[in-house]
Image (cartoon, rainbow, N blue to C red):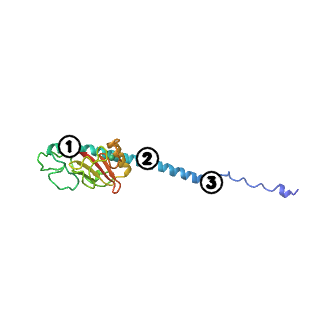
Amino acid sequence: MNRLSIHRRAPSRRAPHVRGFSLLEIVIAVALLATLAAVVAMRSGGAIDKGKVGAVLQSVDSLKTACVSYHADTGSFAWEYSGYSATDRKLSGTQTAAGWAGPYLEAPLASGQNPWNGTIHVYATSATAGQAGFDVDGDGAVDVTSNSNMLYLSNVPATAAQSIDNALDKGAAGTWSTSGRVTYTASGGVLRILLHY
Ligand SMILES: [Ca+2]
């Protein structure tokens, strides 16, 4: 036997092997992280929408109260939105209508009060802004065609509109978006809520 081969120095011990991640493992990890991020985003998005829907429902309550009081005092229906310049028909400010005993709202409605940054108006006829009237009982015939207060919001996402409809129409017959006190037009995200008639 070759002496040289016997006494050949053994190769130095290699450092303990640290196995890297395989491509498959990295792909799985990235997919898991992406799923987690999506779930978190969906949950927070849902919470934000819930908050916005709640804000609209609160506005409906306070505006309804204001409109009912205005009507009781003056015998007519108020108009209210930021920039509306009449001095006898508003819920806010100082008005000249006979019997007016407001302000019924501390400040004029402003677009910031629409959670989706669209317009926010209180109209005095349901026929305003493309709505012939409200089919309150959902039987297919319009029940309220004029002389009413309607809250008008634009830019409202369909899911939020449907939540508001669910809360206020509570199983009214007919198609949710066209019957009851709450109606919705997808184009422009227009939500109309009958406040008082
Ligand atoms: Ca409805």
Does residue 65 lie above or below 16 as drawn?
above
Q: Identify the residue position indicated by label 3 in the image.
A: 22
- Disc 1 and disc 2: Cα gap in Å? 37 Å
- Mark toward the start of the polypeptide (1 vs 2): 2
Q: Which residue lies at the image location 67% right of the left edge and 52% below the top edge? A: 17
C-alpha span from label 3 to label 1: 69 Å
**Dot placed on the residue nearer the N-terminal end, 2 or 3:** 3
Between the C-alphas of marks 2 and 3, the distance is 32 Å
SS under mark 1: helix
Pick whichever of labels 3 and 1 is earlier in the sequence.
Answer: 3
User: Residue flagged by tag 3: what amino acid is it?
Assistant: Ser
Outermost residue toward the right in this view = 1
Residue that badge 1 annotates = 68
Q: Crowding at label 1, few (<14), some or many (≥20) Cα neighbours within 10 Å?
A: many
Q: Residues within 10 Å of mark 3 (few under 14, many from 20)?
A: few
Q: x, y (%) of residue 93?
A: 17, 50
Q: Look at the image and tell me in which quarter the N terminus lies.
A: bottom right
- Name the residue tied to disc 2: 43
State the image coordinates of residue 101 (x, y, percent, origin top left). Answer: 14, 44
